Amino acid sequence: MNKIFPKLMMALAVAAACNAQAQKAAPVAASANEQATSRHFASLVSGGQPKSAELTLFFTMMPKGGDLHHHYSGAIYAEQFLHWVDKQGYCVHKGTYQIETDAGKLAMERAASPATRTCISGEAVMLDNGMLAELLQRWGTKDFYNHSALQTPPDRTFFDTFGYFNPVASTNTADGLRTLKQRAINENVSYIETVFELAPFTVNADFDKAVLAPGLDSAALNARLEALLPVLDKDAGWTGWLEAYKKNVDSASAGIDDEQFTMRYQPFVLRFQSPSQVFSSMVSAFRLARENPKVVGVNIVGQESTYVSMRDYKLHMQMFKFLKTKYPEVKLSLHAGELALGMVPPEGLQSHIADAINVAGAGRIGHGMDIAHEANALATMKAMRERGIAVEVNLTSNDFILGIKGDAHPVTLYRKYGVPFVISTDDAGVSRNNLANEYTLFASRYPTSYAEVKKLSYDSIRYSFLSAAEKQRLSAQLDTRFKKFEADVAAGSATAAAAAAARPR
């Protein structure tokens, strides 16, 4: 040990001297540091087995630009929802793990003795290790593949989680956004474009019947859509909800944006609702995007393989097309093609992505998983490349929900045909995941380089729905952050090399 210690100290001193020298030559150092970072990254992905722990460290440290496919409620971890259960005076039912919100039932539970209560506080759930473990299996995907409890298929498990925590997700948005902001800063993410809250809707049975009538042509459909607009404006419930939504965006987002972090919002439409609900929700979402600069786009979400989602898919795209003519400046990021062979009949896989870009006018595609099955896949990808329509790639949820990963994932096709794509999280709270891990999965599964992953970080700003000025500001911030990151990696590599040289052989 006495022989090793001086050797180690000398090696570290040499490394420190090299780092100090590098600090004096700023322009040269930046290039040298980038090259050193590139070599270090190559060492992590070379060989037969990627170095997962080191890749995790690398991507945790790396500036990751933005997360463009991000669901607000799906990003919150279950533990925070349990705190909100207590904050609102609710309780969680034993066995079902549903949140009780009814005032009368809550009063009955509070009046019962502790031993006979069937509904308990969020803190009580967290203090019971067994209950907490089971709750996390229902409110998220934790332990799905390594426990033997009876469970639904992966896609149902994933989509069912929202029904558990929704009662508290939408009533604590300011607190939730602050949590997501701090988590993003800790993870070196500077921008989030979140699918925030369900856009206001209303029901019109006559409209539903009319637009679902067989043989309705596009002119007749547009006439029906046009006729509903003044009806919506006279609907006090819908207009009141719309005003409340505007206030919620402003109040919840207060104090979120600063020099370190920026967040923007997308109202969403639920694709498995009735046509009148979907269209009225679209109208409110488009109006929100036009009137509030923090609302930068409109989205449609919900399991794509359900009967109503499939039946009404083309109808929904026509609705988007109609509204895009009235609000051409509003941007669309549409969940499309989140399907796998066998989930629906094969003809259901043939045109969802193409319809989203060619009919609805989508500027980005969420998931885009069934592209290989589409009837005109090559033409669709050519159009996406030429128009700069990026795909939001969500490796963890694509694997869990659809069972698609590795070479079966269409990111391989998008890369081959030059379609832009970005790495994103989808529902990090449900998956108990983060953006660094998504980058780690990408680098572990697909041959890549430091130049490509760095470009993906910048592309997450480039393909955002931010204004040109905001993109320029965040890109300039990325320049500064990458210079520091690359300097840190270069210094760390020198230190690691010195430590390796000092190890006994």
Image: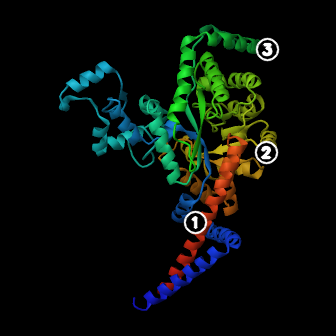
| First in residue order: circle 3 vs circle 2 | 3
Judged from the image, the secondary structure of the residue bearing numbered disc 3 is helix
Display coloring: rainbow
Q: Amino acid at mark 1?
A: Gln
- Find residue 91 and report its horizontal and vertical position in percent: 32, 30
Q: Nearer the viewer, residue 100 or 21?
A: 21
Q: Earlier in the sequence, mark 2 or mark 1?
A: 1
Q: Is residue 308 above or below residue 487?
A: above
Rendered location of residue 370, percent (x, y): 68, 39
Residue 49: image tag:
1
Give the labeled residue for mark 2.
Answer: 385
For the point 42% across and 28% down, the residue is 167
Q: CA distance from mark 2 to mark 1?
A: 32 Å
Q: Amino acid at mark 3?
A: Ala
Q: CA distance from mark 3 to mark 2?
A: 31 Å
Badge number at residue 219: 3
